[in-house]
Every structure is written in structure tokens, then in C-alpha cells.
């Protein structure tokens, strides 16, 4: 006779098998998605109409920043091959040129839409959510039509380039569990964003650009353990409240917090930053946002940039930040009067930073960013500031500001302890009040820089 222990074991195994079969069936069941209705004028469209659609698609592609992820450093536009780092390994973006052998040249409009807005490949497999389809799901049918025309009808040149295999080890490389994630967190019945719930046309347009094609939440919203964004719109307090590390840089808080967010910024500050990578007080640092400015936002028209700024300024503060700022002239007075003899951190600032950022920490506001009340300086997580001191960074070159000004890295000359002292000094000078930085924190960032080569941008971050 079967013992009680064996019966229990058989029961557990049976339950596990049933759960596995149910999960597999759920994952492999086909996802039905809404087909894009044919446009009313189809059949009577002229060559001029088609050209206008392709041009509109080029604008949507820029707003969606497709080129940044789907172009490898030094590679041909949209031919794929750029690594996307993730906790489970490196993924590589795919060839989305209209090449029929290696790209998307055989995709129909509906197949294209299923990939963009629903994360379903032409063969039915699910795309990894490195492709921001939970955000793109909010895009309109017309924008998808225009994007398809841009990629398929003359806007993008076909490139024969095989897709690179992802560096994800088995069993994490098994694809079907991704369908469970997709169906749970980006269900196929997700519809385009309802614009009539916003109080003005500008606010609605900004919400659409931020939540949809701009997919800002992909980087700037914190993620749950299961890797979905904790909120997809302003109904969640964590939406755009600051995200994970992206290529070694912390995605910043875009909500109304006055210290570590955009609360102290004007709409013009936001527009200037998106258009040029800098404003009158601060600047973009780090490769990921450089790409956004260089390949996407600088090509947006003023009305859309204003709409984005209007929407971001409508988001209330999280109130979660621990840092604060209250202007204090004592740091400037101390540096100007030479009272740094017994202050090693102040000496480090004078030796390494003062030439550009000056004793008042403000630089000239046009060339280099100010340090007092700077969101990156005052972020609860100092990783980006530590990385900036160790490895340096470069502003993106844009049409309005073509000079790609750089800050050199000082990791070659500063020890972990010296870097910690310097960063702590900057985070607590001129009225800044933020947590101290330890040598062990610096050591972790230095190790990460060594592993990724210290690259914070690539050769594509330039104007065009």
C-alpha cells in the first residue's frame, strides 16, 4: 500500500503538473487583437497623400525614439544589434528595416501593429518587454498606419542584417513564459489612450506623447518584482517617480518634487532640456537620455514639446524624497576665503571642480550645469553623480546646441574615499542637504564602470 508520505508527494507532483499544463495552455493560447480599420480614403489615395503619410510616420518614429534602440553603435539605421541590458542577460534589438529576408519587409499592417502595440511577433511568439509595447498600446491607429508607411514605403532603407541571438541562458531563454507576462501586464484588449478625460487639448496631447510613443514610463517609473511598471499613467502615484538603473545611470523623478524632481523647473526649462539637453540651471547626463534628446525630442515641434512640459508639470510631487535645499552662502564664502586648509573635501572640489563650476557652484549656467538644487546632485540614490565624477559624461550635440561639451572622468586620479568625500561635499554644499556617500558605494559604481567599459554614450548622439 502507498504510504501517507508517498500519497502526499504524488499529490504535490500532480498539482505542480496541472499548474504547469494550465500555465502552458494559457501562454500558448492565441491572442486575438483588434484589426486596424481601413482608412476611409483607401483606394483613392494619391501619391501626395502617401508621401504625407510617410512624412507623418517619420515624425512618429522620432517621437517614439525607434532609432536609438534599433541601431547598433556605428551600425546602419534601424538594422538592430544594439544590446539592451537586463537582469536576465543581454538582449539585442532586431532589424526593423523593410528587408524581406532579415527585417520586417514581409509584415502586413496588422502584423506590424500586433508587434508594436501588443508585443506579438509575426510567428506568434511574444516579444520581451524591452520593447515598450505596454506604452505603445496607447498609440492611435493613425499613428500606427503612418509608422508602417514610414518603415515600409520609402522612409527606411532595407538592410540585410541577421538578428543577433540574445545572451540569455536556458531556462530563462524559454520564450513561452513571456506570453504569460504579456497577457497579464499588457493584455491584448488594451486600447489607445482616451484623450477626452484631460482638461485641455495641450494636456491631452502631452499625456499621449509621454505615455504612448514617448514611453517615458519605461525608464522613469519604478518596476515591481515581476518587472512591470508600477503605474502606466497619472492615476498611479509612482508613475514617472524615478526608475531603475539604465546603462549605469539612474532614471530621474519627473514629477513635481522641488528637490529631486521637476517641481522647481518651468515649462521652458523642460522644453529647453528636451530640445538641447540642457537648460538655464542643469543638464542631461548619461547615455540613455542623451539618445532621447539627440534622436527623438530635438525633432519634436514646439507645440508638442510644450504639451509634454504641460503634462509633466501637472503631475504632483511624490513627497518621498529625503533630500532638501535651502540657499546657503557659507560654502561659497569658505571657498573664496581660502578656509579649506582643514577640509579635505573642499580641497578636492577646488582641485577638480572649481575651474568649471566655480566657487558658487553655478558655473555660468549656459555652459555647465549648476550644482545647488540640482536634481541629479540631490537624488536619494547618488549612483549617477558618482558615475559622473568617476567616468565623466558628454552633453548631446543637437541642431540648436551643436557643441557636445564634456565633463572628464576623475576616477583615474581619485580614490574611492576621495570620491566619496567630494560627492558628499557637493551634495551638502551651497544649501544642498542629501545623504553622505561612502567609499563602498563608490567602489560598487567603479566596478560597474569597469565591467561596462565606462561608456556613457556612443557615436550616434549627434545632430542630424
Image (spheres, rainbow, N blue to C red):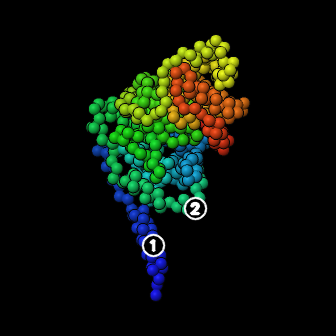
* Element on which disc 2 rests: loop
Q: Are marks 1 and 2 in contact (CB under 8 Å)?
A: no
- Residue beneath disc 1: 12
| Quadrant placement of the C terminus | top right
Q: Which comes before the other along the chain, label 1 or label 2?
A: 1
Label count reads: 2
Residue at 45% x, 68% y: name it. Answer: 20
228 left or right of 101 in image = left
- Residue closest to the eye, 293 or 148: 293
User: Considering only vertical position in the picture, is 333 above or below 24?
Assistant: above
Can you say whether 286 is above or below 164 in the image?
above
Residue 170 disc label: 2
Question: Which dot, 1 or 2, sits closer to the camera?
Answer: 1
Q: Residues within 10 Å of mark 2 (few under 14, many from 20)?
A: few
Q: Nearer the viewer, residue 156 or 459?
A: 459
Q: Nearer the viewer, residue 389 or 72?
A: 389
Q: Which of 430/354 is in front?
A: 430
Is the residue marked by circle 1 packed among few (<14), some (14-19), or many (20+) residues within 10 Å?
Answer: few
Q: Please tell me which residue is depicted at 33% across the width and 53% down the height of the picture.
A: 189
Q: Position of residue 226 (x, y in %)?
A: 46, 52
Residue extending furthest bottom?
1
Q: Is residue 365 visible?
A: no
Label for residue 97?
none
* Residue at the image point whose x is 55% and y is 59% from the top: 173
x, y percentage for residue 105?
49, 51
Mark-to-mark CA distance, 1 and 2: 25 Å
> Residue at position x 46%, y 33% from top?
321
Point out residue 316 in the picture as x, y percentages from the top left corner: 37, 32
Amino acid at each position: 500500500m502507498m504510504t501517507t508520505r508517498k500519497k502526499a508527494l504524488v499529490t504535490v507532483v500532480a498539482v505542480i503538473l496541472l499548474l504547469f499544463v494550465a500555465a502552458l495552455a494559457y501562454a500558448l493560447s492565441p491572442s486575438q487583437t483588434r484589426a486596424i480599420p481601413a482608412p476611409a480614403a483607401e483606394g483613392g489615395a494619391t501619391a501626395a497623400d502617401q508621401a504625407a503619410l510617410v512624412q507623418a510616420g517619420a515624425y512618429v518614429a522620432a517621437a517614439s525614439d525607434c532609432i536609438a534602440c534599433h541601431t547598433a553603435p556605428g551600425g546602419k539605421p534601424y538594422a538592430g544589434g544594439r544590446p539592451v541590458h537586463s537582469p536576465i542577460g543581454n538582449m539585442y534589438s532586431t532589424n526593423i528595416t523593410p528587408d524581406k529576408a532579415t527585417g520586417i519587409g514581409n509584415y502586413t499592417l496588422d502584423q506590424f501593429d500586433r508587434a508594436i502595440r501588443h508585443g506579438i511577433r509575426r510567428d506568434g511568439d511574444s516579444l520581451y518587454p524591452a520593447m515598450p509595447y505596454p506604452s505603445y498600446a496607447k498609440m492611435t491607429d493613425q499613428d500606427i498606419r503612418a509608422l508602417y508607411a514610414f518603415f515600409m514605403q520609402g522612409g527606411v532603407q532595407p538592410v540585410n542584417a541577421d538578428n543577433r541571438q540574445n545572451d540569455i541562458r536556458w531556462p530563462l531563454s524559454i520564450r513561452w513564459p513571456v506570453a504569460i507576462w504579456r497577457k497579464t501586464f499588457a493584455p491584448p484588449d488594451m486600447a489607445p489612450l482616451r484623450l477626452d478625460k484631460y482638461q485641455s487639448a495641450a494636456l491631452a496631447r502631452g499625456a499621449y506623447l509621454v505615455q504612448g510613443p514617448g514611453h517615458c514610463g519605461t525608464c522613469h517609473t519604478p518596476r515591481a518584482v515581476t518587472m512591470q511598471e508600477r503605474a502606466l499613467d497619472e492615476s498611479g502615484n509612482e508613475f514617472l517617480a524615478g526608475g531603475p538603473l539604465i546603462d549605469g545611470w539612474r532614471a530621474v523623478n519627473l514629477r513635481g518634487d522641488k528637490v529631486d524632481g521637476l517641481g522647481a523647473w518651468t515649462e521652458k526649462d523642460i522644453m529647453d532640456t528636451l530640445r538641447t539637453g540642457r537648460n538655464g540651471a542643469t543638464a542631461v547626463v548619461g547615455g540613455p537620455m542623451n539618445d532621447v534628446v539627440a534622436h527623438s525630442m530635438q525633432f519634436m515641434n514646439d507645440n508638442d514639446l510644450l504639451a509634454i512640459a504641460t503634462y509633466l508639470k501637472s503631475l504632483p510631487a511624490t513627497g518621498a524624497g529625503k533630500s532638501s535645499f535651502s540657499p546657503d552662502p557659507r560654502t561659497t564664502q569658505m571657498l573664496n576665503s581660502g578656509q579649506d586648509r582643514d577640509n579635505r573635501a573642499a580641497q578636492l572640489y577646488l582641485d577638480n571642480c572649481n575651474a568649471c563650476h566655480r566657487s558658487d557652484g553655478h558655473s555660468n549656467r549656459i555652459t555647465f550645469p549648476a550644482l545647488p538644487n540640482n536634481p541629479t546632485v540631490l537624488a536619494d540614490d547618488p549612483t549617477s553623480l558618482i558615475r559622473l565624477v568617476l567616468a565623466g559624461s558628454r552633453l548631446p550635440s543637437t541642431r540648436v546646441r551643436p557643441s557636445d561639451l564634456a565633463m572628464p572622468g576623475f576616477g583615474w586620479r581619485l580614490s574611492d574615499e576621495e570620491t566619496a568625500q567630494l560627492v558628499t561635499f557637493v551634495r551638502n554644499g551651497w544649501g544642498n542637504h542629501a545623504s553622505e556617500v561612502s567609499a563602498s558605494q563608490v567602489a560598487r559604481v567603479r566596478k560597474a564602470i569597469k565591467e561596462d567599459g565606462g561608456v556613457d554614450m556612443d557615436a550616434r548622439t549627434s545632430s542630424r
